[in-house]
Structure formats: structure tokens, C-alpha cells
Amino acid sequence: MREISRIVHWYNNERMHSSLNYLAPRDNCRGNPDELLYIREEKLRIGRMKRKEKNMNKSKGGEMAGYVS
């Protein structure tokens, strides 16, 4: 019974739900969900920019772009 209660708690409080823009219900209810979504988008934007820079450096440097050893 304890295991079922733990799973129900996880599902209802901690699991990211698509209907909440992949936020956990606890994050959606506490604080500002728009701010959390903005932070997520900013992290993704920075990650994309870094990956693009890394790929540009690989193609310009001595390494072959896309080469896997």
C-alpha cells in the first residue's frame, strides 16, 4: 500500500504533465509558471547557441565535422 501511495503522490505532484507545458503540478501551482517556462527557454537558447559555436569551431579547426572515431 505504501508503494501505491508513493506512486500516486509522484504522479499527481512531481511528474511533468504535457497539459502544464511539461511542468510538474507542484511547480505550476507554486510560484510563477510563466517565469519557469521563460527560464527553461533561456537555458535551451543558450545551449543551442553553445552547440552551434562548438560545431562551427569543429568545422573550421583541425577536426572533421561530424566525424566519429
Image (cartoon, rainbow, N blue to C red):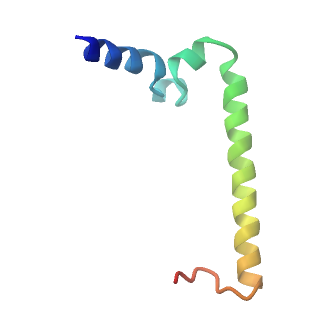
Q: Is residue 1 above or below residue 19?
A: above
Residue plotted at (68% across, 27% down): 36
Report the number of numbered marks: 0
Q: Position of residue 38 (x, y in %)?
A: 72, 32
Q: Is residue 63 left or right of residue 25?
A: right
- Dividing the picture into quadrants, the one containing residue 60 is bottom right
- Dividing the picture into quadrants, the one containing residue 29 is top right
Residue plotted at (52% across, 84% down): 69
Q: Is residue 37 above or below residue 26?
A: below
Q: Is residue 67 above or below residue 20?
A: below
Residue plotted at (75% across, 74% down): 56
Q: Is residue 13 left or right of residue 67?
A: left
Q: Position of residue 68 (x, y in %)?
A: 53, 81
Name of the residue lying farthest toward the front = 2
Nearest the viewer among 17 and 15 is: 15
Q: Position of residue 24 (x, y in %)?
A: 52, 23
Nearest the viewer among 32 and 14 is: 14
Q: Is residue 40 left or right of residue 69?
A: right
Which quadrant does the N terminus fall into? Answer: top left
Q: Position of residue 63 (x, y in %)?
A: 68, 85
Residue plotted at (73% across, 69% down): 54
